[in-house]
Image: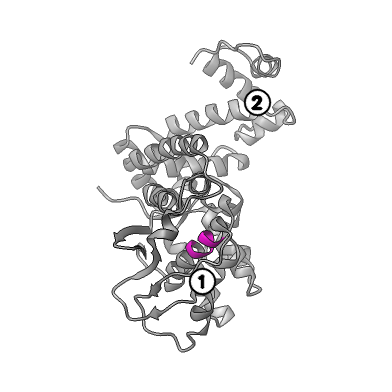
Amino acid sequence: MLQAQRTTSSGWASAIGHALAIEGLDIVELFAHAGLDPELLTDPDARIAQDGMTRVWQLAVERSGNPAIGLHMAHVVRPAHFSVVGYSLMSSRSLLEGFNRVVRYQRLIGESADLMLQLEPGQCRIQFAIHGDRLPAAQQSVEAAMAYALAFCRWMTAEPVTPLSATFARPAPSDPAPYAALFQCPIAFDAPSHSLTFSRQLMETPLATANEHLAKLHDRFAGEFLARFESDPVTHQTRQVLCRLLRQGEPKRQAVAAAMNMSTRTLQRRLQEEGVSFQQLLERTRRELALQYLGQPQLTLFEIACMLGFADPSNFFRAFKRWFGLPPGQYREQVLNGDDVDIKE
């Protein structure tokens, strides 16, 4: 069976956009030029093809003339870039525990990312790798991950954390000054891997943001999301595309397949392998979104019908009653009144 393409989370892509803005670049324009839909950047559940992000990095280097542009990621640290993974890291007891969580959930940030922890006497080595699909990953992508990891350590500890060493699996750049300025430690190029090494004492120091209850809660959310993501990757990706396209009307198979860079036949086959048809997934997605939207009182029933891709609101009303056994207006009234809603699945 063919593997689904590697993707990057929209949160991480947005972080890259903030970093590129430091050089005066516009991520929306770069996305469009790279053949990506800029609306993906504002969809928190969207996934973006890794090869598309490689093209964005290539364009960024070409237009800025700065091959070390990935290091700007050290200046845009926000937990939301990692979604639930970032908050899970924040609530960890130590940096070591937090990075173990990042290793566990790294696929939620990007399937192309590969993070590995190596514990050694007195030190901890974090090894980074980014894998491409058809295109080899840009060196800026892995350097961005390293810069962000270091900045996150400094932000979490509120200390000017300095690694014991940093290694790069690439030739020495013509200008190593940006690397020396950021990492402030011995640096080796042409190394076997990209890595940062920290003292064990630093990695095991208790964090002021530690919260065991929140950590367990975030673990549950991240674990549930990861389980769905890993068990049915194409179904998950298709649902995300459907959520994005529904506002434009009922999505056709051809449009969804094109958004996923595959043929209609391939999409149908992969969904079938995961035990669902396109029509079943479309209906399931509409059902789930309908319940979410009806819980938002600022949205009218007409607006919700349009957001679900129904050309005629009456079609939405009939579909909702078929799904749940009561009209959408009655469901909303009961929910907003705090009443128990007896819906028929």
Residue assigned mark 2:
294
Q: Is residue 153 magenta?
A: yes
Asked if residue 94 can be seen in this view, the reply is yes
- Three-letter amino acid code at disc 2? Leu
State the image coordinates of residue 145 (x, y, percent, origin top left): 46, 64
Q: Nearer the viewer, mark 2 or mark 1?
A: 1
Q: Which residue is mark 1?
A: 70
Q: Is residue 139 above or below residue 32?
A: below
Number of numbered labels in the structure image: 2
The residue at 56%/44% (across/down) is: 244
The foreground one among 210 and 177 is 210
Q: Main secondary structure of the magenta part?
A: helix
- Apparent side of residue 160 relative to residue 24 in the rendered image (left or right): left
State the mark number for residue 234.
none
Vertical arrangement, residue 1 with respect to residue 319, above or below:
below
Image side of residue 283 versus residue 230, left or right: right
Q: State the image coordinates of residue 136 (x, y, percent, origin top left).
A: 36, 69
Question: Residue 333, image x and y in percent?
Answer: 70, 16
Front residue of 105/316: it is 105
The quarter of the displayed image where residue 172 is located? bottom left
Earlier residue among tags 2 and 1: 1
- Report the residue that reaches farthest toward the left: 1
Give the SS element for disc 1: helix
Magenta region, residue range: 149-154
Quick one: 219 or 285, which is closer to the camera? 219
- What type is the residue that disc 1 sits on? Gly
Q: Is residue 67 visible?
A: no
